[in-house]
Image (cartoon, rainbow, N blue to C red):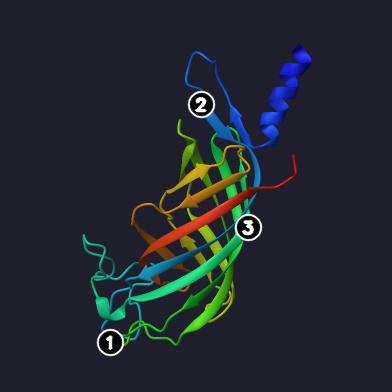
Amino acid sequence: MRGTFAASISALCAIGLVHWGSAEAASPKTLKGEYAFTGTASCLFAPGSDPGPGNPTPGKALPNSGFNANFQPLVNATAFVTSFSVEGVTVFNNDGTGTFKGTSVSLTERPTPGPTGYPSFPASASSNTFEGSFTYVVNSDDSFDTQMAGLLTGTVLAGPRTGQTTSVDRPPLTGLISKDGNTLTLASVVPAVETVTFSNGDVWPRICHRSRVLIKMDKD
């Protein structure tokens, strides 16, 4: 009997979704293990405009940057869009925490500069590494919510910003868990403003939509 119980627990851990608690109460659930992920995203930047040749306050967003209550750029003439794909590994710990690490490749369309010409750059492609940590909660319907624990950080490997580092205060993402716990999805479900900071002093608000598919890796 004891051996059968232990084998059952091991099987649940192996598929990644662990149920805790008694049958009489709602059982809190956690995720455990390494998941490979891939996905895509697109971001609308609202950097604002400046009367000088560049950002006069490096490390601080321009006063007219960002979005209004309807998620429209305050200065539409300088807004631009970047899209990117990602691949990496997410590790879920069964205490409600986790980490992720990956690489991305992005395409940036040419912005339409305002009268000041800020920002102004040609269309380009780039790649970077990124990593971060998060907390998560699994809900009773087998959905789950994630929240960044600190900033997502990265390093640009190729493109006009090669060598620069970045940090982003990424908003929460919501996910769904497959029946066997081996496949997860994550996505943005509401628009939210985030801020990306570059090591050269640029600080740009943006709104992104993201989607991810995560597949359990056979490492347990």
Judged from the image, the secondary structure of the residue bearing numbered disc 2 is loop
At mark 3, the secondary structure is: strand
Rendered residue at 55%/76% (across/down): 126
Judging by the rendered image, the residue that carries numbered circle 3 is 88
Splitting the image into 4 quarters, where does residue 162 fall?
Answer: bottom right
**Residue situated in front as seen by the camera: 195 or 106:** 106
Q: Secondary structure at mark 1?
A: loop
The answer to whether one can see residue 217 in this image is yes
Left/right placement of residue 218 relative to residue 69 reads right
Q: Nearer the viewer, mark 1 or mark 3?
A: 3
Residues at marks 2 and 3, CA–CA distance in whole angstroms: 27 Å
Residue 166 as seen in the image, left or right of residue 49: right
Quadrant in the picture for residue 196: bottom left
Mark 1 or 2, closer to the camera: 2
What is the x, y in percent for residue 183?
60, 46
Marks 1/3: CA–CA distance: 39 Å
Q: Amino acid at mark 2?
A: Pro
Q: Earlier in the sequence, mark 1 or mark 3?
A: 3
Quarter containing the C terminus: top right
User: Residue sitting at 50 percent across and 65 percent down?
Assistant: 166
Residue 8: quadrant of the picture: top right
Residue 116's mark? 1
Which amino acid type is marked by label 3? Answer: Gly
Question: What residue do we see at 55% from left, 67% from top?
Answer: 85
Q: As rendered, which of 59 and 128 lies closer to the eye? A: 128
- Relative height, residue 93 to residue 103 (above, below): above
Residue 168 in picture, x, y percent from top left: 45, 59
Q: Is residue 148 visible?
A: no
Residue 28's mark?
Answer: 2
